[in-house]
Amino acid sequence: MSRFAGWLTLTHTQRWHAHRHSTGSGHLYQGRFKSFPVEDDEHFFTLCRYVERNALRANLVRRAEEWRWGSLYRWCCGTTKDKSLLSAWPVRRLADWVEEVNRPQTEAELAALRRSVKRGCPFGGAFWSDQVVRRLGLESTLRAQGRPRKHENGS
């Protein structure tokens, strides 16, 4: 999926510039596509809630499942064909999933998620994240961004 999304955004950008007889640098989406490891426990549900709450958080709908272009709408209100477009989750969806999505997320959940989105670091428990960082060589996602600070003593 990651390679496809990358190809799709690159192709769209190239065709957009070709159609407008323009050139540009960077992507049209400027970082809209993100990819980072997620633990398949409550962290997975937190991430899915975040994604499926986007329209609700932006006050575009009263309830998340009302956003016709979202996966939650397809899952609970869509046709059989709509539902066939959705991939299976790695874990079983919670029984009260629609209500769970409509429940506001805490500031702590949002901060942890946004850190993973911004840095590309794993989103999961401490032990799991440490294992994934070592296995995938993601140490740089945990270090502070930018140049290392100089010590007070001038070294």
Image: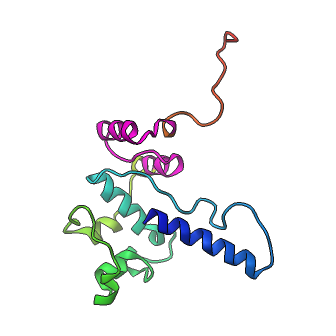
Would you say residue 121 sits in the magenta stretch?
yes
Give the vertical position of 29 relative to 124 (above or below): below
Which quadrant: the C terminus?
Answer: top right
Residue 103: percent from left, percent from top: 34, 64
Residue at the location (30% across, 41% down)? 128
Dividing the picture into quadrants, the one containing residue 9 is bottom right
Residue 99 x/y as whole percent = 28, 69
> Residue at the location (60% across, 37% down)?
145
Vertical side of 142 occupied by 61: above or below: below
Say whether residue 90 is left or right of residue 138. Answer: left
How many marks on residues?
0
Write the residue at 30% across / 83% down. Answer: 84
**Front in this rendered view, residue 20 or 112:** 20
- Camera sees residue 63: no
Q: Quadrant of the N terminus?
A: bottom left
Q: Position of residue 132 (x, y in %)?
A: 35, 41
Query: Residue 80: horizontal and vertical position, in percent?
Result: 28, 89
Magenta segment's dominant SS is helix
Residue 115 belongs to the span the image colors magenta: yes
Q: Magenta segment, which residues?
A: 111-140
Whether residue 123 can be seen here: yes
Q: Residue at the top extreme?
A: 153
Above or below, 134 relative to 49: above
Viewer-closest of 81 and 71: 81
* Residue in the foreground of this view, choosing between 32 and 73: 32
Q: Based on the displayed image, in which of its 4 quarters is residue 68 positioned?
A: bottom left
